[in-house]
């Protein structure tokens, strides 16, 4: 198993602003925890620094108009109607270097895709990527350029069938949109239901269009869905579809805002529940390009992505967090200094409520989408 980890120190130069929940510190913290566990010096793992993606690479998905707006606001120019492109105070703030940050995110995911496409790695992980909400001509949900779409396109150039699996708490709407009519790209997103959470989409009925019908799959979930509700629903839907589709490569979006302490969402997964899902996914495709995604409780981000990278390298980690990371984790509010979370019991009626909703979604997917894959 050859692997590649993509990481840049340059992220420390970018800042969405003091009030914004997306903190760049989470990347440094993740890199530090990986290093403390010895995961940045594995014999068969390369650690690579990405170059920013160039304008033409980004224009494969994004409109030239939008790119010019991003470049203008990033350089401090006055751009009339920036709000039409989703830019301004709120989710997608204008900050100096915004365009360079978007280029770096795209460059990292394109490098991960290239390593796998050229056989340099079987699994590559770019945890600063996974910005799955960006649309061709609009910023959305903290995302300016959709590096996940660009990575899938790069793998399609190789002629491969690509499965995109997105386990972020939010629907992977930008990626679904990009490949909605394409039967060579199977997109699967599990997320908190769209009538409770941004971006408001991701229902089972969004199944694709034209030749792509059946190749967009959504498993929406009730608030408070925990590991015990999530895992059987995931197992009932994701492995059978991937086994039927037989991807040459899988692109994973590994947002960890599904965690029970995440301040922005309402799912209730644990780090070990997340890691178990990642391990199951890794067995379902011969090659993997893994990206990051959401995650706004910083110690969760570092613990989850370190666990994911360990799984990609088939390394088992001790649960106790390395001493050199404990101070940071405490400062950022982690109470039990372990890679795993203590078990939390959901009230029985809450779990039944979440379970019943998941059961109905799974039944609907099995009824409407499985037959299209001869399942
Ligand atoms: Zn998210």
Image (spheres, rainbow, N blue to C red):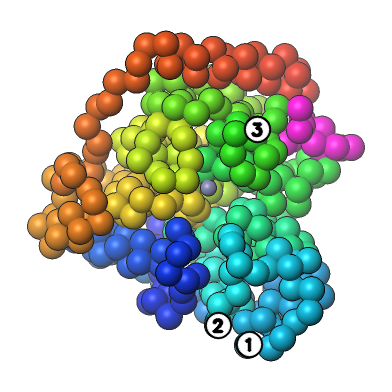
Q: Give neighbour class at mark 1: few <14, some 14-19, many 20+ (Cα, 10 Å).
A: few
Determine the residue positioned at 25% across, 27% down: 343
Q: Which residue is mark 3?
A: 195
Q: Is residue 87 visible?
A: yes
Which range of residues does the magenta coloring cover?
205-216
**Residue 16 in magenta?**
no
Q: Is residue 320 above or below residue 24?
A: above
Report if the CB atoms under discs 1 and 2 are less than 8 Å apart.
yes
In the displayed structure, does residue 164 sit left or right of residue 137? left
Q: Is residue 123 visible?
A: no
Depth check: give the residue in front, 230 or 34: 230
Q: Position of residue 318 (x, y in %)?
A: 16, 44
Determine the residue positioned at 85% across, 37% down: 209
In the displayed structure, does residue 35 sit left or right of residue 183? left
Residue 210 falls in which quadrant of the image? top right
Q: Is residue 288 above or below residue 62?
A: above
Q: Residue furthest left?
A: 323
Q: What kind of secondary structure does the magenta stretch mostly adopt?
A: loop
Q: Is residue 77 above or below residue 17?
A: below
In the displayed structure, does residue 65 sit left or right of residue 78? right
| CA distance separating discs 1 and 3 | 36 Å
Q: Give neighbour class at mark 2: few <14, some 14-19, many 20+ (Cα, 10 Å).
A: some
Q: Which residue is mark 2?
A: 96
Q: Secondary structure at mark 1?
A: loop
Q: Give neighbour class at mark 3: few <14, some 14-19, many 20+ (Cα, 10 Å).
A: few
Q: Sequence-wise, which precedes: disc 3 or disc 2?
A: 2
Q: Which residue is mark 1?
A: 76
| CA distance separating discs 3 and 2 | 34 Å
Q: Secondary structure at mark 3?
A: loop
């Amino acid at each position: 198993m050859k692997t590649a980890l993509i990481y840049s120190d340059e992220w420390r130069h970018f800042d969405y602003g003091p009030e914004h929940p997306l903190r760049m510190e989470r990347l440094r913290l993740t890199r530090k925890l990986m290093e403390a566990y010895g995961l940045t010096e594995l014999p068969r793992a390369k650690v690579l620094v990405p170059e920013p993606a160039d304008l033409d690479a980004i224009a494969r998905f994004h409109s030239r108009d939008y790119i010019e707006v991003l470049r203008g606001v990033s350089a401090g120019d006055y751009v009339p109607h920036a709000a039409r492109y989703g830019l301004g105070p709120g989710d997608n703030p204008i900050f100096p270097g915004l365009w360079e940050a978007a280029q770096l995110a795209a460059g990292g995911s394109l490098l991960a895709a290239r390593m796998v496409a050229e056989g340099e790695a079987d699994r590559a992980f770019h945890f600063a990527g996974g910005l799955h909400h960006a649309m061709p001509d609009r910023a959305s949900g903290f995302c300016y350029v959709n590096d996940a779409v660009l990575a899938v396109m790069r793998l399609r150039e190789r002629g491969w069938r690509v499965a995109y699996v997105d386990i972020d708490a939010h629907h992977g709407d930008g990626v679904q949109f990009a490949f909605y009519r394409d039967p060579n790209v199977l997109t699967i997103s599990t997320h908190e239901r769209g009538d409770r959470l941004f971006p408001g989409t991701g229902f089972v009925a969004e199944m694709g269009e034209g030749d792509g019908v059946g190749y967009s799959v959504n498993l929406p979930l009730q608030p408070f869905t925990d590991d015990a509700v999530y895992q059987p629903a995931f197992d009932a839907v994701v492995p059978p579809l991937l086994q039927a589709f037989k991807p040459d490569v899988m692109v994973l979006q590994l947002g960890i805002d599904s965690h029970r302490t995440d301040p922005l969402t309402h799912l209730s997964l644990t780090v070990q529940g997340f890691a178990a899902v990642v391990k199951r996914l890794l067995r379902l495709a011969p090659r993997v390009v893994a990206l990051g995604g959401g995650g706004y409780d910083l110690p969760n981000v570092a613990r989850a992505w370190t666990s994911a990278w360990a799984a990609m390298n088939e390394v088992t980690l001790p649960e106790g967090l390395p001493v050199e990371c404990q101070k940071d984790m405490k400062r950022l509010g982690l109470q039990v200094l372990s890679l795993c979370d203590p078990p939390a019991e959901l009230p029985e009626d809450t779990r039944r409520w979440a379970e019943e909703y998941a059961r109905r979604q799974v039944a609907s997917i099995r009824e409407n989408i499985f037959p299209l894959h001869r399942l």
